[in-house]
Amino acid sequence: MFKPVTTTILCVVIHAVSLFAQKDCSHDHLGLIPLPDLGPDTYHGMQGGLYPGGSNERPADHLAACIERVSQIQPLNAYGDPDPNGRVVMMSIGASNPATEFQRFVNTAVVYEPVNNKLSFVNGCEGGIGIQKMNTLDEVYWDLALGALADSGFSVNQVQVIWIEQENTLNTDTVFPAAPNSLVNDYKLLLQVIHEIFPHVQICYVTARAYAGYADPEEFDLGHGLLYPRDYFNGWAVKFLVEKVINGAPGFQTEGPSANIPFITWGSYHWTDGSNPREDGLFLDCDLDVADDGLHLSGQGEYKFGQELFEFFSTDATAAYWFLDQDYSDVEESIAESDVRVYPNPVEGNQISVVSDTESGRVFSYRLFNVQGALQLSGTSVQEIDISGVPAGMYMMQLQYDNQQITKHLIRL
């Protein structure tokens, strides 16, 4: 039932963990509030939320601009010409944690039946390389990343989607908002290089780093720019960066002959207050999710954030144009995600209810996939669904109302 999806993971993951580095699990619950949970409230006088106005939803104009971009994505040949036998290449840019997160995401995506069978993945992350070592064309990083792309059989002309998670490993500034604003400038330089190298990139998704507070600063010799609270400020930097694009700030032009950077929007947001769960339930367990140095992720942590990426790209309104096959994504008439609720979620019992604010009482079809993309359950209903035969785990549920489709995330306890 699964369709082949080309993927190339050629990233050299260099953790470079000090023999003396260790994690401090007592450095937890430090009280900072994740941006999505902060919402319209403020931190040092600045409103939270991923987008302006304390919102976690893309503003209408920004969403329209995203859709205008992603609607142009189509298979391209090595020369950048439309070709039904060509590919859509998604490439990652980052260091060690992003490398493993992206690989875990790809491992799930390539076996997920609804994924676009023209989509290919190239992991361009290189461990130990911060954003400051990517910001000019002559940096060694680009030799490595473009070598991975070429070794996988693709050209720069086929890269149309880029995912980024980065930090300046040498910047130790912890003053707000100067620290995130400095990283915004680093991102601007990186995006200018991306704009020059990849002529057909339509969109860049930028993700915020995970919690780094478990790394003991007294016994940590990687890059002190990676330490707490710069992990928290990393999300603020992405927020400021996206807002500059939304507002058309000077030097952040994405349209027309004056464009100097590719179009960007938010990707997933990975920061939590350590093991203190966010409102959506995400948390970072020091013992189980974090490696011995307190910074890098364990295998379980890699899987957790890989699934965060998968959930984002398999449900995001803009990704539906390129991540999913057309058979699974009617992007022109999709109902809003907020119109449909699945509850209880997480679910411990054997029944769930699906309620739509706009389609109440109407028959819909449903399909439930596990994280490996295997179909677990399907049928039709007007509200109640029996999941008694479904084992505990994380699932993606596709709901279809005639031509209207939406995907929801479900956790079975």
Image (spheres, grey):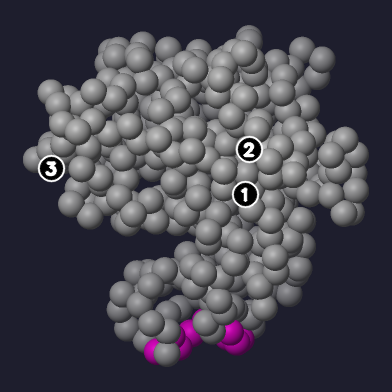
Mark closest to the chain's N terminus, 1 or 2: 1
Q: Are marks 1 and 2 in contact (CB under 8 Å)?
A: yes
User: Residue shown at 19%/33% (left/top)?
Assistant: 19
x, y (%) of residue 48?
A: 38, 31
- What's the CA distance linking mark 2 and mark 3? 36 Å
Query: Of residues 292 and 55, which is closer to you in this image?
Result: 292
Tell me which segment is drawn in magenta: 378-388
x, y (%) of residue 137?
A: 64, 15
User: On the image, which quarter does residue 47 sit in?
Assistant: top left
- What's the CA distance linking mark 1 and mark 2? 8 Å
Please, which residue is most extreme toward the left here?
26
The residue pinned by badge 2 equals: 148
Q: Is residue 381 magenta?
A: yes
x, y (%) of residue 172?
A: 29, 14
User: Residue shown at 46%/29% (left/top)?
Assistant: 166
User: On the image, which quarter does residue 303 sit in?
Assistant: bottom left
x, y (%) of residue 253?
A: 68, 17
Label 1 vs label 3, nearer the camera: 1
Q: Are marks 1 and 3 in contact (CB under 8 Å)?
A: no
Query: Of residues 149 and 342, which is closer to you in this image?
Result: 149
Q: Amino acid at mark 1?
A: Thr
Q: Amino acid at mark 3?
A: Cys
Q: Which mark is residue 25?
A: 3
Secondary structure, mark 3, is loop
Residue 3 vertical placement versus 304 (above, below): below
Residue 241 vertical placement versus 281 (above, below): above
Secondary structure, mark 1, is strand
Q: Amino acid at mark 2?
A: Ala
Q: In the shown orientation, is residue 356 left or right of residue 198?
A: left
